[in-house]
Amino acid sequence: MQTTTFKTDEEFFVDPQRCIGCHACEMACAECETNGQLPMISVDYVSRADSPQTSVQVCMHCEDPVCARVCPADAIQKDEFGIVHSATTARCIACANCVIACPFGVPKKFEPTKLMMKCNMCYDRTSAGRKPMCATVCPSGALFYGTRAQLAAQRPASVAVNVFRFGRETVRTKVNVMMPAGATELIVD
Amino acid sequence: MFTTLNWRALRWATCWTMLLLLAVVVGSRSLQNFDGALVAYLFGTLFATFGIVYRYAVWLQRPATQLYWRRGWQLLFSRRFARYARAVATRAAVDVGGQAFIFRRSRARGIAHVLLAWGCLSAFAITLPLTFGWIHFTLQAGSTTLYEAHVFGFRVLTFPHGGLLAFNLFHALNWSSLMVIAGAAYFIRRRVTDAGQIATQAFEMDWLPLVLLVLISVTGLGLTWDYEFMQGRAHAFMGITHAITVILLLVWLPFGKFFHVFQRPAQLGVALYQLEGAAGPQAVCPHTGEPFTSAMHVADVKQVATEIGLDFTLASGGSHLDLSPQGKRAALARAHLAARTRSGRLFG
Amino acid sequence: MSRLPVAAEQLIAEFGPHLNYPPREGFPGRDQPDAVVPTHCCFCGMQCGIKLLVKDNRVVGFDPWEEFPFNEGRLCPKGVQRYLQNNHPDRLLHPLARVEGRGFAPASWDDALDRVVGEIRRIQSAHGRDAFAMLSGVSLTNEKSYLVGKFARLALKTRNLDYNGRLCMVSAGAGNKKAFGLDRASNTYADLERADVVMICGTNVSETFPTLTHWIWRARDAGAKLIVVDPRMTPIARTADLHLPVRPGRDSALYGAILRELIVHDWLDHDFIAHHTSGFDAAAAAVESFSLPWAEEVTGVPAAQIAQAAEWWGRAATSFLLHARGIEHHTKGVDNVVSCINLVLATGRIGKPYCGYGTITGQGNGQGGREHGHKCDQLPGNRDIENPQHRAYIAGVWGIPEPELPGKGLTAYEILEAIHRGEIRGLVSICFNPLVSLPNSEMVREALEKLEFYVAIDFFLNETARHADIVLPGSLHEEEEGTVTTAEGRVTRVRAAVTPPGEARTDTAILLDLARRLGAGDKFAFATSEDIFNELRVASRGGTADYYGITYEKIERQMGVFWPCPDLDHPGTPRLWEDRKWPTNDGKAHFNAVPFRGSGEVPDPEFPIILTTGRVVSQYLSGTQTRRIGKLVDQYPEPLLEIHPVLAARLGIRDRELVRVVTRRGSAEFPAQVVTTIREDTVFVPYHWPGRKSINRLTSGHLDPVSKIPEFKVSTCRLEPTGRTAPSARETAAHASA
């Protein structure tokens, strides 16, 4: 049934400062088989009036997912590889608690179909040992999928961090963000 | 969920199971109308009732679920009762009954799910009263051509043998089975052809329920086949396999995929909640300047977060949860830019 | 004759642009395709490798091609969505004949082609052969580019053949030929990896060549300093170590000032200059007066930033300089290019590992297409059509007496001017949409309306083709075999994934049939694209762009071959000039003296603001393809006027207010986008849109005297706020503007 060849040595790394806002990831995400032409990644200008800076957000796949904890329907589950999946279609009641609670602003709710959907790290590809669509096409390395060793060799000035502080709350994630060498957490306050 | 005993849920489950047992005894006129051959089904149903109520009660204790449960009832019986009752009725008909939201995922999925759901529900609606001895059929005294239907021991209907009504009444379960098989066939096909489904499906959650439903339907049809065309030669086999699959299903109801049938009505509470939210003040994102949900929703999610031990209070005294999803993403990007800027290089 | 047969709105309703979106669950069959075809993106000069998924002779999806060395699976949004140009509702499926008052009606191939041939004969016998012109484009493969060149000269027998590369790479080509005697980027992008300094000049890499970003980031990861010269803070300029926001039209002053700094501080490679170059003294003398304060005054870039750029460039051990249309689309395009090359030569950082220079070719086959003879002054192998030896060689390959080979003709914009004057009366176009892409497009429209006969070959009815008498449905990139040469000079293989739908034919088949009907069939006896390529190899042999040693088999085996590749066992030449032998008259690389001069238009009290144009990441060139792909249109649905808040405040312009932009050519209205990321004296509008939303109605027709490239990057304008807030992009539907 579920024959998976998920590569556990490969990880997802994000560097928003490398993002050039091209939206290739978003278009490619819509080609993923698990979300039927709906992009699950978000690319937005942070403040276009002052800067072309863009935010790029995949699901960070929290160790203890906030979305799952606030879900009234038990619809969101994390699997053995740490992938937090989209709400199961049978259970989701489209209340959007996850949309409001996720500190990274990831889940999306689709009201007509009464579904919450989110990035599942291209599970159709990663479970077959391939890279997620977005990280494969990303032309700027803002999204990178590979081993820690590969990344360390390529980007000596940065370090992978997976601890985030949102005010008083600390969130640990499966997905890493690239920070200046020496950093241990990203503080959002 | 089932690892530690939940006393509260245990009390509810015991209570409901006892109530059902009582209803069976009373409804079958002290078991006078109870068909002894169906006793295994009865025990299965009692077990399922216990399990479902237990799980439901545990589920309702989750802060997020409780919130919607409480709010849902509060809103329904608020001063807007008339409006909200109408809304609930409409949504129940459209979403739960007609399953419109599944049609919006795709027409074929909608049709298949309606067949599957109403096939199952109609089958239960027929078999449970029979199992409980609430309904039974007899030949009219002195007649060989007229049947009588009794509900709770009261005669409610007399109809001729061989008529259209009789044919449909006695074959109703077959129609249910055919609906279930048609619906399940579509979903099975989808599970073997759709790459997204193939990637994310799991045996217990996705295949087992379909396989069970098909087995039940096929063996059920087999019973009819047997006495119509095989003169009852395979009755024992068909009867036993059918009983085994049905009881498996009953026992498994509280644990697996089918529990969603009991959860789905929660959507009605959410619908009321959203109606109330839309009418009230909106939460405006400090980043985008746009409303993104109701102020009530943000406040409630914050409360739920607190109850489950999350604290997104910022140094400024505000909360990270006051931001819209886009606002949160921007906050994260800004924080990252600030960290890079402090390090002296935007790129690294 | 060639006014629109019916109102543009009616043609738009019938032929589009309509937006193509994939079905909600994707096209059926893409998870079990009949074929997975490794080929290339049809858009820019990066020519990223991509795999197309084919089901039932339709392209139904894509998969990244991670093994292809340049892009390793990386793509931009255009690449991701490229597959949606196939399977498109607007696709032309039959030859069309114009019907006055009704639009276009399907015609048979025989009728359509007979009509075309008849009109060519009629016009040429009445007004001379050169009265029938041909316009071509460099989204065509090398084979088709070569074929068009041969077709125009041997079948159409006209000298007036030019191509849309005239709007693209000609300044770079001319500058490279002046400096190096050869026109190709000197290095592969892999040489960026260990460059100490990367200077990118007038190139919005992040939006126009997104996949090149990876290689620039590789350089930065290894510690390189990035210098970006651009009047706007583009996404790649945002994080750059140094961003020089140059005033449009003043580029050569900036590079001249940097050269002067190199000389003043003696950051020169004297040995290289002495042994391998000529003309240094004249170049140095020309910039003697380019002091930093003067340069700050002229370019608007603070002197300290210029000095910093010069120091980083001067002190570096390795470096890479890249430029694109930002410095090339000028009446001084060639000047700007050679002033950049002067910096490379002064420091001797070329022809060595991690020391590179190149123009970033914009169009899909901008490199190969400008080498094989569908340019008015050129013959295959980048030969000169006015050079007697070159003419004799090609005449020999083509089997004609040399005098029968037409001479140099007019360039693209000049052809339209000649049509406007009534000197050219017939036109055949392929792969070119000049009504959107040429400047001063009201003149272009008037010219099209004056044509006696116009036949367009294209797969969609683009804005220009609406003026045609006959439209011949040609082929998409994925419908023909061929080769394309990337911006790196890498010759790659393009595959036919599907066959043309309906009655559409391959471009090659159409040209061969026309040639036969024009009586030149014996010169066009090609059975396959590879046959054409094999003749191209011979025709290019001994030229500067020598493809003789390149075969389809070698390209496939090596995943690309870099020209020059003069013989069959030659592996190709990824890095040029390691031999220090330049194909110039003295065998050396040439400095060029670049005195400063002004642009075609300079701000004055009537038109005080500089208008510059460019591209956005989700659209490609005139948008014939990309304005038909739904998600690409949604990403940036209408052209916006980027304006600095200081200028906006001075003129009382609000964000999203409709602003009338007025130039000497006319006026058009665009919603204002008030941003601090542009110079205060400059406004920017991207050019991919047609009709009312076309900024090229306003741009100037001034041409570079050498390259004849139009000055898209500098027009002067005034802005008139209308007081009205722009309607939503959805209401405007700019992609299909009439």
Image (cartoon, coloured by chain):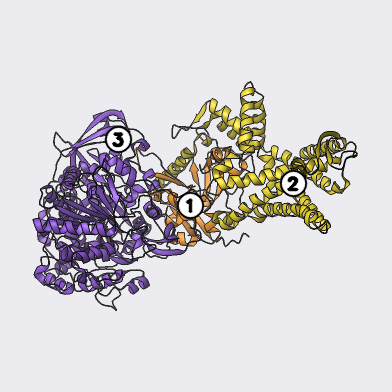
Same subunit: marks 2 and 3: no
Query: Where on the picture, by quarter, is residue C459?
Result: bottom left
Where does the C terminus of chain C fall, quadrant-wise?
top left
The amino acid on which the numbered mark 2 sits, given as a three-letter code, is: Leu
The residue identified by callout 2 is: B173
Label disc, if present, on residue C672 of the rendered structure: 3
Q: Nearer the viewer, residue C172 or C118?
A: C118
Q: Position of residue C725 (x, y in %)?
A: 32, 30
* Disc 3 chain ID: C
Residue at 67% x, 24% y is B77
Q: Label 2 neighbourhood size at 10 Å, few (<14), some (14-19), many (20+)? A: many
Q: Label 1 neighbourhood size at 10 Å, few (<14), some (14-19), many (20+)? A: some
Query: In the picture shown, does residue B85 fall above or below C187?
Result: above
The chain displayed yellow equals B
Query: In the picture shown, does residue B199 fall above or below B86?
Result: below
Query: In the picture shown, does residue A169 fall above or below B295?
Result: below
| Label 2 to label 3: alpha-carbon separation | 67 Å
The chain displayed purple equals C
